[in-house]
Amino acid sequence: MSFIEKLNSIWEENDSLVCVGLDPDLERFPKSIRDVPDAIFQFNKRIIDATHDLVCAYKPQIAYFSAESAEDQLTKTIQYIQSEYPSIPIILDSKRGDIGSTANKYAVEAFERFKVDAVTINPYMGYDSAEPFLSYQDKGTVLLCRTSNSGASDIQDLIVDGVPLYQKVATLISDKWNYNNNCLLVVGATWPSQMAKVRSLVGDMPFLVPGVGAQGGDIEALVKAGKTANGKGLIISSSRGVIYASGEDDFDSKAREVVLKLRSQINLHRK
Amino acid sequence: MSFIEKLNSIWEENDSLVCVGLDPDLERFPKSIRDVPDAIFQFNKRIIDATHDLVCAYKPQIAYFSAESAEDQLTKTIQYIQSEYPSIPIILDSKRGDIGSTANKYAVEAFERFKVDAVTINPYMGYDSAEPFLSYQDKGTVLLCRTSNSGASDIQDLIVDGVPLYQKVATLISDKWNYNNNCLLVVGATWPSQMAKVRSLVGDMPFLVPGVGAQGGDIEALVKAGKTANGKGLIISSSRGVIYASGEDDFDSKAREVVLKLRSQINLHRK
């Protein structure tokens, strides 16, 4: 089953557009779990067990694993999801981007080493930096378009032919890079008006939407701006707002509460 | 000693602007070394031992290590250079780029886990994605500007305010991001006219120049276009053209020959 099919299926199965971002930061772990062996995996496992019936995807952020030399715990986290909850797609958030020969190796990293369903990449280096990912037809390639952070405007909003760069990027990807129908775009939750514009440019291409929760995006506005005609099309990701909802040992049940609420808030506006 | 000081020193010491890129690809290794334990490290070690007196930097490309789950051999490679040839700066080529909180983790990956002197990053996400790197004052942050690959024009050449995007990026970094005097730019060897323009915009900021060798850049043209008034300012990187100069067990001595020749060709035009 391709990533896109898996995504369409889980949107229905869990009635959810919520993605939980796994940004495991030891310094923010409850004391009860900080010092156990494989603490990062154990933390993720409890978050996953507490939320698996409420999400449409998990998105591990590789930087948090790399900073701790914990690639093995990223592998364990991915294998755990695939073994226990195989219908849930996994998006590796790594934002890679390099010349073709090197991009090939990054595609191997994502799709053969970590065996995820989709990966985020950066489009700045152009087509040959994306092609090795796109050629994995059944995998998803999630390209940065308009990101959620404060500095996004520095480059993404520069005006090209009368429109902001991120719109040119969206059109380029939609028109030229999506020949396998496996592209997605990152469009930050913090900018609903930009999201509406991008939606108007790219049809039903799914968006990965970071920036709700800790980054403060407005849910009603973003859902109305980004949803497709069938009330889907969005993978709305919250990381820190979910996984650090409590700093105590009830972090998993509190994470579940936050995801339940977020799913309800989203579903209120998408149908 | 800061990265910039280290670079200025080694440019003199080895009379060289040549950087050797370490892109270890098991499939291209000579049979004699492919199956030895820690083959990637052993391969790199022989390249390093054969070229250390001729280079101004080594640039390991992390994708080649990640695709093989060989982060440990990247660490060994870096530690070997630092122990045996401590005057040679190491640039980790990873082209990271993410929101501030995640960029912090990538900065930890580069500067605390792998302990390199400089790292390549992607500017598409804007200032807060670069700031965690820039704040390591003694480290180098090498930002993509005009890359060497065929797809570079897709986005980097789009016209903003009458000039190509890569020139806006160069000016932004030079004017606003270089407050610690620790920024460098990636400017591909394959585009000497673009390099001359970028040089005119950013003063003496060093360039990392990939694309000679396997990618076919013209050495005379790029040196004249990119050198600073003192005949330096460039880190001219060749990877595959050096390390795979021979597919046999003489790969290290052949690599030395290629680097010697490249250094001479460059020095002919820089003084």
Image (tube, coloured by chain):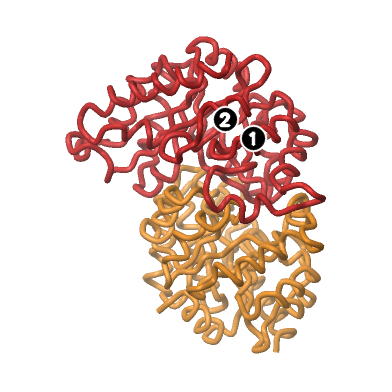
Chain colours: A red, B orange
The chain to which mark 1 is attached is A
Q: Are marks 2 and 1 on the same chain?
A: yes
Per the image, the residue denoted by label 2 is A222
Give whichever of B116, A125 is nearer the camera: A125
Whether A92 is drawn above or below A261: the answer is below
x, y percent for residue B44:
50, 60
* Lateral position of residue B128 relative to residue B211, left or right: left
For label 2, the crowd category at 10 Å Cα-Cα, with few meaning under 14, some 14 to 19 and many 20 or more, is many
x, y percent for residue B141:
52, 65
- Callout 1: SS: helix
Q: Residue furthest top?
A: A13
Whether B71 is drawn above or below B60: the answer is above
Whether A212 is drawn above or below A47: the answer is below
Circles 2 and 1 in contact, beta carbons < 8 Å: yes
Residue at the image position 67 percent from the left and 83 percent from the top: B228
Give whichever of B76, B229 is nearer the camera: B229
Residue type at mark 2 is Leu
The quarter of the picture where residue A243 lies is top left
The chain to which mark 2 is attached is A
Give whichever of A263, B182 is nearer the camera: A263
x, y percent for residue A268:
51, 16
x, y percent for residue A96:
57, 45
Q: Residue furthest left?
A: A32
For label 1, the crowd category at 10 Å Cα-Cα, with few meaning under 14, some 14 to 19 and many 20 or more, is many
Per the image, the residue denoted by label 1 is A195
The answer to whether residue A252 is seen in the rendering is: yes
The quarter of the picture where residue A209 lies is top right
Residue type at mark 1 is Met
Alpha carbon separation for disc pair 2 and 1: 7 Å
